[in-house]
Image: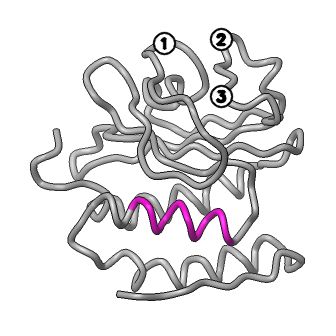
Amino acid sequence: MSSSAAFDLNAPRADRYDQLELQCGPLLEDDDAVANQANFAAIVHAAFGWHWVGFYRVSGDELVLGPFQGPVACTRLQRGRGVCAAAWEANEAVLVSDVEAFPGHVACSPLSRSELVLPVRDAVGQVRAVFDIDSVVEADFDAEDAYRIQRMLDRHALRFFSDHEG
């Protein structure tokens, strides 16, 4: 499927979330999990213009970089270190208003000031990836951002994994 997304970055966030939710279903209909991850990262990035948006996939005891939008990123993140690992281990969203104040924060970009990381779960609730969002604005995320994005991740989660991924 070929598609494009357009968002008014001056519109209220709630409106952009509504638009995003309408566009996600048809955009994520491909049988390829990587294509769906890539399109989800791209459309979230287009809707909000955040600094970095993307997936880190669980692989053994580390998180490995997946599809993303933004500057070059850390390729591997270790269990027990950083915001992504905290969301993975807790199996819940982690919202950080000031990354400098987060113990063990992994600085993939010196421009990031706040971060929101959400678990991407399979059908039995196991975390198979995390969806990481970084902003150059301090305290850029709130509970509504976490709720709206988590709801989309949960709704489309099975489209983000191939049957053979484990």
What residue sits right under mark 2 in the picture? Answer: 104
> Do tag 2 and tag 1 residues touch (Cβ < 8 Å)?
yes
158 sits to left or right of 81:
left
Which percent across, then down, holds residue 132? Answer: 57, 43
Which residue is rendered at x = 62% and y = 35% of the image? 94
Which percent across, then down, holds residue 32? Answer: 24, 66
In the rendered structure, find residue 108 and report the number of the disc placed on it.
3
158 sits to left or right of 151:
left
Which residue is rendered at x = 41% and y = 45% of the image? 66
Please name which of the two marks, 1 or 3, marks the residue nearer to the observer: 3
Gap between marks 2 and 1 measured at Cα: 9 Å
Q: How is the image coloured?
A: one colour
- Residue ranking furthest to the front: 72
Where's the C terminus, which quadrant? top left
Residue 139 vertical placement versus 67 (above, below): above
Q: Residues within 10 Å of mark 3 (few under 14, many from 20)?
A: some
The amino acid pointed to by label 3 is Cys
Residue 65 vertical placement versus 61 (above, below): below
Gap between marks 3 and 2 measured at Cα: 12 Å
112 sits to left or right of 107:
right
Which percent across, then down, holds residue 72? Answer: 61, 40
Q: Residues within 10 Å of mark 1 (few under 14, many from 20)?
A: some
Which percent across, then down, holds residue 86? Answer: 53, 24
What residue sits right under mark 1 in the picture? Answer: 80
The amino acid pointed to by label 1 is Gly
- Residue ranking furthest to the left: 164
Where's the N terminus, which quadrant? bottom left
Secondary structure under tag 1 reads: loop
Give the extent of the magenta segment.
37-46
Q: Earlier in the sequence, mark 1 or mark 3?
A: 1
Secondary structure under tag 2 reads: loop
Secondary structure under tag 3 reads: loop
